[in-house]
Amino acid sequence: MKKLFLLCLLFCTTLGFAQNQKITKLEFEGLKRTKESFLRRLVKVRPNTVYDSVLVKQDIERLKRLPGIANAKDSIYGIGDEKTLVYQIEENFTIIPGLRISTANNGEFAFRVSAFEFNLFGNNQLIGGFYERDVFNSYGVFWEHPFLFSDKLGVGFNYQDNTSQEPVFFEEGVKDYRFNSRSVEGSLLFSFDFKNEAELGASFVKERYDFIGDEPLAGRPLALEADKLIYRGQYRYVDLDIDYQYFDGTINEFTTQYISFLSGDELGTQFLGDFLSIRNDLIHYRKIGARGNWANRLRFAAAFGNEDSPFAPFTLDNQLNIRGVGNTVDRGTAALVLNTEYRQTLYEKGWFVVQGNAFIDAGSWRTPGEDFGQLFDGSSTRLYSGLGFRLIHKRIFNAVFRLDYGVGISNESTNGIVFGIGQYF
């Protein structure tokens, strides 16, 4: 008992001494592309202040969240009162090409290629674009500077011209339309503190639907168009520790949009009018043992003001919510989706990692004209399960090649392969 008391006393004395050390210098090691002046703006520890282990831990976690940084550690050295705190940085490669291959809604080969730089000029700017061929051609360009004005305020802009063949689900049957959306958006990016972020944006959008096919439905539109102004707000809570491919913690992201109809033809006024949409993603990661990761995402989305429109905003799709279900197989004015998967590192050597995973995806949709009860009565529920693997480069930002095979757990369900770049969530 006496030995235990002395050990506790020694620990408390050592901890108190460490907490009272004065940091006379702050240094960064391992920087190649990232600017040291940029990192000094972000971290909370300052030279000539008393050592604070809580601030140091927050700095390390914040540094590891930056796209340009693969890992970060801290160390202290010095003699007497001259103590230097060193942040040891391992950088990511951040010029990332992307490729997504799928089957278009008309059965043709579809693909999307992209290239993004996530650490432009060494200060976490994003610039990039994409080209997509999915029956028709689409493209977009993006630029963001999250810390343009300070460590708490930045801006972002993007332009997109998206054209695709979209199924629209009428009561009389499913019909295909050529959908085109051209938009330009500007946004303000806020970083209130270590765990809380927000965005406020506005975009001008021109939308047009044109019927494709030989047998239009009586009384249903052949074409409709609308000009819209979309106001978007987003709040993000992040309490996440990242250790290469392993995540541990929670993210909650709430997004709301108000879509204001500006002008259009008569049918556009009828089907594409004003409405409000909300979406909340609650994501929780738990590291299991030394090589496992359990990931969960609960999504709720709803639209108000266009409950009866067949041109509903939320889609059931392989790439978005249910793996194996197919491409844009249904639309709804509300959705409730749960994704859960277990990831196990099967092989790891140097920068290369192979992960295997098992998943369950479940969701339900509210079809146009129905109430929220449909989300819970089982009439629109989809349940899929499957296996997959990931090939990961630990020192390239978001360099995860993902392949999953999902199988429907019900009669007349589909199955299929889904692959892309980055974890599914």
Image (tube, rainbow, N blue to C red):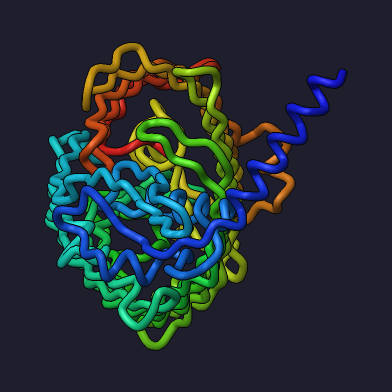
Task: Examine the rendering and report whether any part of residue 250 can be seen.
Answer: yes
- Extreme residue in the right direction: 1
Task: Examine the rendering and report whether any part of residue 365 can be seen.
Answer: no
Q: Is residue 273 left or right of residue 36?
A: right
Q: Position of residue 35 (x, y in %)?
A: 21, 64
Q: Is residue 395 left or right of residue 76?
A: left
| Quarter-of-image position of residue 121 | bottom left
- Extreme residue in the front direction: 80
Note whether 260 is above or below 162 in the view shown: below
Considering depth in this image, is 346 or 306 the residue closer to the camera? 346
Q: Position of residue 182 (x, y in %)?
A: 24, 72
Please give the count of numbered marks on the rendered protein: 0
Could you tell me which residue is drawn at 29 percent across and 69 percent down?
38
Could you tell me which residue is drawn at 56 percent across and 50 percent down?
239
Considering depth in this image, is 84 or 204 the residue closer to the camera? 84
- Extreme residue in the top direction: 346
Considering depth in this image, is 347 or 407 the residue closer to the camera? 347
Could you tell me which residue is drawn at 26 percent across and 43 percent down?
90
Considering depth in this image, is 77 or 419 the residue closer to the camera? 77
Q: Is residue 91 left or right of residue 233?
A: left
Could you tell me which residue is drawn at 17 percent across and 44 percent down?
98
